[in-house]
Image (cartoon, rainbow, N blue to C red):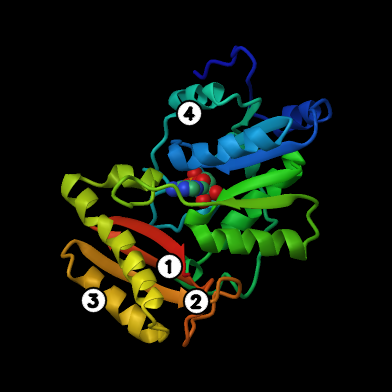
Amino acid sequence: MVRKDRARMKVIETIEKMRKLRKALAAPVGLVPTMGYLHEGHLSLVRQARAENATLAVSIFVNPTQFGPKEDFTTYPRDIERDLKLLEKEGTDIVFMPPEEEMYPAGFNGWVEVGGVTERLEGKCRPGHFRGVATVVAKLFNITQADRAYFGQKDAQQAVVLKKMAADLNMNLEIIILPTVREPDGLAVSSRNSYLNAEERQAATVLYKALCRAQELWAGGEKDAEKIRRVMKALIQREPKARIDYVSIADAETLEELETVKAGALASLAVKIGKTRLIDNVVVG
Ligand code: AMP
């Protein structure tokens, strides 16, 4: 059972209660959508949202519709009590954590589809993923009526897709993207890092090493995207535990692959380390 008698923080589990409460909230309301199992990446968003808004709302919902049938929805790490303690410490006003039936009642069948930018990279490897993401985030925006929403650059394509969704559908809020938080050895902090054993954890440093190599090559004058992709792939392939899903150097807005790399391009990759699929990116220049 989740303890709900927290000093100041309100834990809300139904849409109806969230709507009622919303009317009384001080503006602006900042929202940080998460799937829980919180780490320093999430907390960086929470802190920034806390600093910039009169009311801080954080949602915790492991969204089934953004997972493929063979993906890790059922095994995705969860620790609600720990999450609530961390959020309380950060001065969170509201935690919205609806059960699945609340978000997807029987007969649910309304979807948000963003075209174009969802067709590449993660969208290609994970069909339906961004439909699930866009749908749940649109629902969270509607339910919380937030003035600002905070997301991480760690999920660079997600950030592009959600900004496009908000612009194309005239959603009345500001979307703020914050930098990727990393471990001291460069690995991007992620809930999925908890799947890695000690050897895999070591092997996982290859993602950021490949991204840094791209950055170095570009700074050293190499502007041929294919050459940079090739060096990145070779570096990753030297790690026996790593299997590449994709290595990309793309336009940061359209996500189309580039021939010539300009400053501001998005170098991104998805690599399986053992059974764990990790993603990371850097903006070149
Ligand atoms: P998730 O719980 O994985 O859905 O992530 C919730 C939010 O935290 C998303 O906007 C992510 O992009 C963001 N996030 C996840 N990892 C990091 C990180 N290492 N640095 C910054 N933001 C992150």
Q: Of label 3 and label 4, which has the lower sequence position?
A: 4
Are the residues tagged 1 and 2 within 8 Å (C-beta)?
yes
**Real-space Cα separation, disc 2 to disc 4, in angstroms:** 35 Å
Horizontal side, residue 234 vs residue 144: left or right: left
Q: Of label 4 and label 1, which has the lower sequence position?
A: 4
Does dot 2 land on a helix, a strand or a loop? Answer: strand
Instruction: Confirm whether residue 112 shows in the render.
Output: no
Image coordinates for residue 125, horizontal then vertical, percent: 43, 69
The image shows residue 72, relative to residue 131, as above or below, that is above
Does dot 1 land on a helix, a strand or a loop? Answer: strand
Does dot 4 land on a helix, a strand or a loop? Answer: helix
Quarter location, residue 101: top right
For label 4, the residue is: 83
Quarter location, residue 243: bottom left
For label 3, the residue is: 234
Q: Nearer the viewer, mark 4 or mark 1?
A: 1
Image coordinates for residue 96, horizontal then vertical, percent: 63, 32
Instruction: Confirm whether residue 70 shows in the render.
Output: yes
Nearer-the-camera pick, 148 or 194: 148
Q: Which residue sits at x=50%, y=36%?
A: 43
Does dot 3 land on a helix, a strand or a loop? Answer: helix
Please tell me how crowded label 1 is: few (under 14), some (14-19), or many (20+) other residues with Cα within 10 Å.
Answer: many
For label 1, the residue is: 268
Nearer-the-camera pick, 232 or 145: 232
For label 2, the residue is: 250
Are the residues tagged 1 and 3 within 8 Å (C-beta)?
no
Horizontal side, residue 21 vs residue 125: left or right: right
Image coordinates for residue 1, horizontal then vertical, percent: 49, 18
Quarter location, residue 115: bottom right
Q: Nearer the viewer, mark 2 or mark 4?
A: 2
Are the residues tagged 3 and 4 within 8 Å (C-beta)?
no
